[in-house]
Amino acid sequence: MSIEYLSKNSLKKFKNKLLVVKFGGSLLKNKKNKESFLQDIAYLKNKGINLILVHGGGPLISSSLNNLNIKTKFINGLRFTDEKTIEVAEMVLSGKINKNLTSSLCNLNVKAIGISGTDCNLIKAKKKYTFNSNQKINLGFVGEVEKINTDILKELVNLEYVPVISPIGCDAKGQHYNINADYAASAISSSLKADKLIFATDVDGIYLDIKDKKSIIKSITVDEINTYIEKNIISGGMIPKIKCCIKSLKYGTKNVSLINGTEEHSLLKNILENKSYTTILKN
């Protein structure tokens, strides 16, 4: 697709609006996918749309831990994070991935600035626990968002920067925590009352039947989501992502979409062509 064919009229409703985009770690493995997605970010920014990019990096963290012979385990889908693991996670997220994405955007003539959630107390975090049969389980240095420093983000956006954010948070004592990037993006979006939050993953969205690609749910309400979770239509790893969407809508985000980041220029297709993947709506 040639992105130059897109009409100026398609951009009008997003001019000067704020979009928060979460770029999944699984998409970083494919160079072509990454380049296409960053081209979309650059195109939209250069047309006057404000953007914040939040990235993950789980697969690359796992690969780095494996290369260092550091064993890793997951509890209820969350990576147990000891002292060695948090060091590697921060090195991969705030170092390798963050700076790679930032420099790539800068090479596309975007004023991108890479920051960690620890910078300027951007993401104030606290220790997160999980539960099995009401039993509290320690996850190590896994965190959850307590507060977002919206002032620094507003200032950067007003100065025409695209903040590229690594989901590492910090508590009042200086302890660093690894935070799920979905939750970080959701908190940032709702705190800023973003016009749109977009989750770029490796699937089109929510399906009635994951084995049937034609069963994609193009639009769904919060009440319908809760019903589908009860019926096990929405299950497994999709549940925490969807709950992030619901929470973000509840606390200020105006619109949430799931898109397939493996499809070339999927971000532009969603924003400018209104291509339906899955859009989540308030009731």
Image: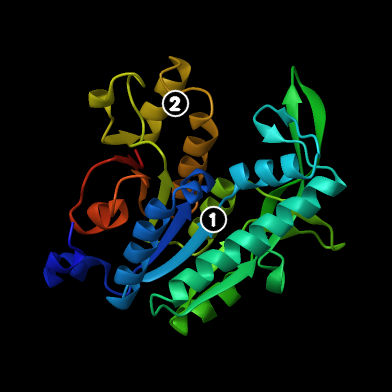
Q: Secondary structure at mark 1?
A: strand
264 to 107, vertically: above or below:
above
Camera-near label (1 vs 2) is 1
Residue in the picture at 49% in, 22% down? 235
- The residue nearer to you, when weighing 115 against 11, is 115
The correct choice, above or below, for 231 with respect to 159 in the image is above
Q: Amino acid at mark 2?
A: Asn
Residue 76: horizontal and vertical position, in percent? 67, 27
Q: Nearer the viewer, residue 83 or 196?
A: 83
**Number of callouts:** 2
- Residue 139 percent across, percent down from the top left: 79, 36
Q: Position of residue 260 (x, y in %)?
A: 35, 43
Which image quadrant for residue 109?
Answer: bottom left
Residue picked out by circle 2: 226
Query: In 3D space, how far apart are the residues under numbered discs 1 and 2 (Cα atoms)?
Result: 27 Å
The reply to whether residue 106 is visible in this rendering is yes
Q: Which residue is situated farthest in the bottom direction here? A: 159
Q: Amino acid at mark 1?
A: His
Query: Helix, strand, or loop for circle 2?
Result: helix
Q: Residue at x 47, y 79 (%)?
A: 161
Q: How dense is the environment of label 1, judged by Cα within 10 Å: few (below 14), some, or many (20 and up)? A: many
Tag on residue 132? none
| Position of the C terminus by quadrant | top left
Which label sits on residue 55? 1
Identify the residue at image location x=30%, y=69%. 44
Name the spot of residue 9 as percent of width and height, x first.
12, 69
Q: Residue furthest front?
A: 67
- For label 2, the crowd category at 10 Å Cα-Cα, with few meaning under 14, some 14 to 19 and many 20 or more, is some
